[in-house]
Image (cartoon, rainbow, N blue to C red):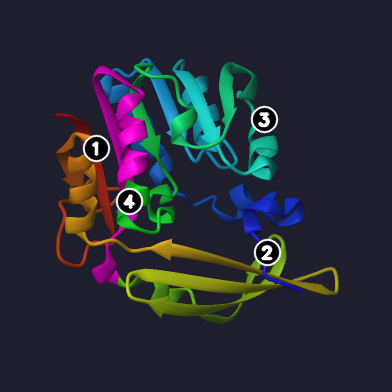
Amino acid sequence: MEPGNYYAIPELAAGYDADSRDRRDLDFYLDLAEGLGAVRVADVGAGTGLLCSLLAGRGHDVTGVEPERTMLALAQQQEHAAAVSWLHGAAETLPAGWADLVLMTGHVAQYFLDDAAWATAAAHAKRALKPGGRLAFETRNPAAEAWRNWTTAGRSTGQGPVRTEVRRDGDLVTHTDHWIRDGSSRTTTETLRFPSREDILTGLESAGLTVDRTWGDWDRRPVSADCPEWIFLTHPV
């Protein structure tokens, strides 16, 4: 059987929130939206829609954009899903000049696997911003080599045990996961990019965006050589 897309498999995707319950980015982005006074917030690559639901619960006008229909179906079951506008697709589906804040959370920026794809996504996010709007996103710091911790002899999840293999090719890292569930096995694979800071900034510049602030982790520490995250807050030039 060919490796599948984790996010397209209902029985695996349904466990995403439970297996990611220690996510530290949620409070960061909720506080960021509040601190910026963002009324309209768009989340590109909304996944299971948890952040969108939490934002809507705090009174923000929220649009969630998600390309994978399985994840979008899960998103529409969140607590405040009825208060969120859901769009199937990517950043290009966002209405122009609508958002005070566009987010790319869950390391969505690492799913754009080359410079052209990243620049295009950033340009669509910029197009969606109102005057004075902001784009915020994060990528993993390549120097921290997070992928080294992904290879496991076996780990437990709510969906059963999983064994992971990792292959690196330049700034692209592919992890292949072997899931055992109810006596049967399934294999999924995913490739992420670990772009350099220069590549990130070049894409932002070509999209007409510049950086306001950066942080090195969800506790708002400064960026350093070995910080785990690069978190960016940007605005149109």
Task: Decide which of 29, 21 is in the foreground and name it.
Answer: 29
> Residue 34 shows which numbered tag?
none
Q: Are marks 1 and 3 in contact (CB under 8 Å)?
A: no
Q: CA distance from mark 1 to mark 4?
A: 11 Å
The residue range painted magenta reads 119-144
- The CA distance from mark 1 to mark 3 is 31 Å
Name the N-terminal-most of marks 2 and 3.
2
User: Residue at image x 60%, y 48%?
Assistant: 17
Kindly indicate whether the residue at mark 1 contacts the one at mark 2 (C-beta within 8 angstroms).
Answer: no
185 displayed left or right of 40:
right
Horizontal relation, residue 47 to residue 3: left or right: left
First in residue order: circle 2 vs circle 1: 2
Query: Could you say which quadrant of the image residue 233 lies in?
Result: top left
Place of residue 90 in the rendered image (x, y in percent of width and height, measured from the top left): 49, 37
Contact? badges 4 and 3 (CB < 8 Å): no
Rounded to the nearest angstrom, the CA distance separating label 2 from label 3 is 23 Å
Residue type at numbered disc 3: Gln
Quadrant in which the C terminus is drawn: top left
Q: Going from the N terminus, do you reach mark 4 or mark 2 first?
A: 2
Query: Residue at label 4?
Result: 116
